[in-house]
Image (spheres, rainbow, N blue to C red):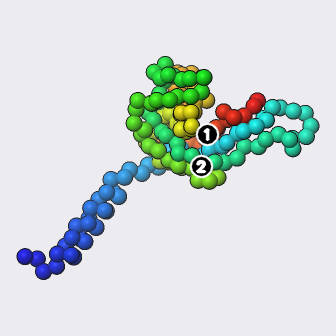
Amino acid sequence: MFKYPVLINLSLLMIFIISCAANKKQYDQGITGKVMWYEGNFMPAIGDDANRSKPVGISRTLYIFEPISAESVDITNRVWLSVIDKKPFKTVKSDESGNFKVSLPPGKYTIVSKEEKGYYVNRFDGDNIINPVKVDKDKWTEIEVKLDYKAAY
């Protein structure tokens, strides 16, 4: 039938791989920042700060959703969200130092980290959107994802 079936199959595979890579959308804007872990004493004090804890960068998978309103979900102990009935728009994993960067189309998003007790919620905007982040066209929004549920203030 064909003289070179292996060559034809490899060519088809290469075309498939290139077309899959081309379908992955990259944007000129998005979210960049650090995931920081806060644990221990962060109480304001006069004098020696040597005994106070310091935040450290940490690796976590971040889940980015279309905006989620606090009224539409069940939040336990005011900080834990066990179930999100939406599929994440995107996910991104921070490196060991907490750094991450994810390209997104312009818009408003909810960004959360999934911890042992559920998704951690610690910020709301005036519209009661959970952990809100706004991405503007052609701009990178810089944020700190603050995991401070084991910190004392």
For the N terminus, the image quarter is: bottom left
Asked if residue 81 can be seen in this view, the reply is yes
Residue 31 x, y percent position in the rendering: 53, 44
The residue furthest top is: 71
Give the class, few, some or many, for how many residues have Cα within 10 Å of label 2's Cα (few <14, many ≥20): some
Secondary structure category for the residue under label 2: loop
**Can you tell which quarter of the image residue 85 is in?**
top left
The residue furthest left is: 1
Taking the spot 59% from the left edge, 43% from the top edge, the residue there is 142
6 on left or right of 135: left
144 on left or right of 73: right
26 on left or right of 82: left
Which label is found at residue 59? 2
Taking the spot 70% from the left edge, 47% from the top edge, the residue there is 56
34 on left or right of 118: right
The residue furthest front is: 116
Residue 50 x, y percent position in the rendering: 87, 44
For marks 1 and 2, give the CA distance: 11 Å
Asked if residue 117 is positioned above or below residue 72 in the image, the reply reads: below
Taking the spot 39% from the left edge, 36% from the top edge, the residue there is 87
The residue furthest right is: 47
Query: For mark 1, what is the residue?
Result: 145
Residue kind at label 2, given as amino acid type: Ser
For the C terminus, the image quarter is: top right
Asked if residue 134 can be seen in this view, the reply is no
**Foreground: 37 or 139?**
37
Taking the spot 72% from the left edge, 34% from the top edge, the residue there is 151
